[in-house]
Image (cartoon, rainbow, N blue to C red):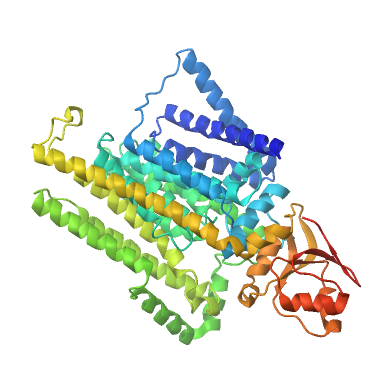
Amino acid sequence: MKVGIVLAVLGFVFFALALIGYSSTLRLCHVNPYLTWITGILVEIIMLYGFAMVNLLRPGIWIVTSLGVLLLLSRLIFGYLGKVSIHYEGLHLFDSWMIFLGIVMAVVLFQSPLIHYDNFSHWATIVKFLMYTGHLPGAQDTIISFTSYPPATALFITQFVTFTGFSAGNMLVAQYILIWAGSYSIFATLRDRTRGLNSMLLCLTIAISYVFNINIRLNNLLVDYVLAILTVAGCVGIFVYRYRPKMLAAHVALFCGTLLLVKNSAAFFVTILVIDYLVTLIRHRTTGHWFRQILRLTWQFLGTLVIAALPFIWWEGHVHSTFTTSKHEINAAAYQSQLAHDGVQGFLQIGQAFLKQIFSWNSLSTQGFLVINIGLISAWAIIKYGCHHPNPLVKLLGGLDLITGLYYGSLLGMYVLSMPYAEAITLDGFERYMSTVVVLNLFIGMIVMVRVIDETFYEQDLAARSTLTYQSIWTKNGYQLATFLVMFFAIIMMYSEINGTTFTNHYNRRALPVTLSKVAQPWTKLNHAKILIVDPQKVEVTTYYAGYLANYYFFTNNASGQATFSKSPRVFRKTLNQYEYVVVPKYDRRFSRGVRQTYHQHVRTGFYRIHQDRLTQIQR
């Protein structure tokens, strides 16, 4: 046990040194310091993706990570010799907030179990598959259902757990590192990072964003929040590099390419980055003859898009050449078949349910939409009429509302064309999907508002700002009080998320995944064993939750759940004889009675090998 802990710690240090190596090297390449962490992670993901696609994932993980460590060692050696130097700004107030609360959140996630259904239907299962097989799934690997889902986040998580050990907590920490690195990028937009009020407003934004992510929280491997934070970081980079065309093109290609490898639905958010990129190119085009300007802009724009699309094109080619069909695959024929199956009446029913959800006051996404609108309109009015400073917040709000409206349309299209009618009519996952665009709009709105607030300060010369450069003692006291209040709420809101996750973990202590871990050890060798999981909760069986969980836990493609059993010993025996193993995470009175009548054994919970005339318990 102690040896395992030591190895996990050493593995984490090795991984961390590699990430620092990439980050410091990117600084040498003049990547913005606040974007180096997330950029470094995305560079690693793209490299891992390349190795995975040529069936060299395991050596690729070691090569990519070792390269990061070597880059760090080179940086330290050349820095010691005085040949390379990097300017560091030092720690700011927001750095302390990010470091301290980030570590506390990571500790809570490390102790968290995986509970959400989709962890076991795909996101955790694909990580386990990559970890223990060392390659992407093929047509014969039926344990993976959503074979068209790109593997970006799974590759990064696999890299992390390769060195720290495979566990639910380690997987959650890995994804949290990705999220936290993306969140850190927003501080690159600050005009003056020494102003506590502005930086704490951005910290508060990070904390508030988790309120709209509350349907799934951070203690899962779903990528809805990842999509939002990567898009935010992408927009931040487009703004920061707007005067550096080559860096801008590289940034857009990297972020768009990686987003497309996170999830198929990321195409919507890539479109936002592409439009932002095009507008930025037009606004900051170089001088010269108009024809040359158009040629240069077109070449840069299309060239960047082609490079960004290449990884996804490679993935689509891999999917079509490897699998005949896949769940949620981008496929025009499948969409046409779905539409023909549901018919116009089905479309109208789904549309009515969709509109009802949008205009419901109980909808968290609708509440978020209203909060963003009211907040930006209020800020616009106060700054314009109270501070006599014209600002673009209303214009920005129009753009954000347009994004929301278009996303509503794309989401409705997904329900109609991609989902089975039974799931679509209940708007399965609606709030989870909508949380992505709400979080995105929240970040963009607050980033622009903070810059507008900075522009209303009395002293606009950043170098001249000090404790003496206030219009009056009253404005100074007001600024200090506002800073304290915002910092207080930023800490409280973040602790609320931490405590909420802790409470969720405690609440789920009797959930099926937790009780399963108490009666059986997880399997790590891919197999085809037929396993029955006894679950008294019928809904967990009918929704295939129990089956997906058992498949993930025992690493098999032949697990299934059952909630009811025949009272006839003959039928009971026949049912169990279809399987090799049976696992009973929770006491089920009917199953225990059936075992007693059929095998004359007393069984409450446990993991058992099924024989013709008895059950043999397998010790945990």
In the rendered image, the residue lying farthest to the top is 81
Q: How many numbered badges does the structure rendering display?
A: 0
- Viewer-proximal residue among 406 and 606: 606
Q: Is residue 347 left or right of residue 569?
A: left
Instruction: Please tell me whether residue 503 is drawn above or below residue 110 in the rendered image.
Output: below
- Viewer-proximal residue among 403 and 200: 200
The residue drawn where x is 59% and y is 46% is 170
Q: Quadrant of the N terminus?
A: top right
Res 275 visible: no
In the rendered image, the residue lying farthest to the right is 613
Q: Is residue 320 left or right of residue 475?
A: right
Instruction: Please tell me whether residue 573 is drawn above or below residue 316 in the rendered image.
Output: below
| Quarter holding residue 5 | top right
Res 187 visible: yes
Instruction: Please tell me whether residue 8 is drawn above or below residue 426 in the rendered image.
Output: above
- Viewer-proximal residue among 335 and 356: 356
Measured as percent of width and height from the top left, residue 222 is found at 53, 58
Measured as percent of width and height from the top left, residue 510 is found at 61, 64
Measured as percent of width and height from the top left, residue 305 is found at 44, 49
In the rendered image, the residue lying farthest to the front is 602
The residue drawn where x is 69% and y is 37% is 2
In the rendered image, the residue lying farthest to the bottom is 345
Q: Quadrant of the C terminus?
A: bottom right
Measured as percent of width and height from the top left, residue 212 is found at 39, 60
| Quarter holding residue 294 | top left
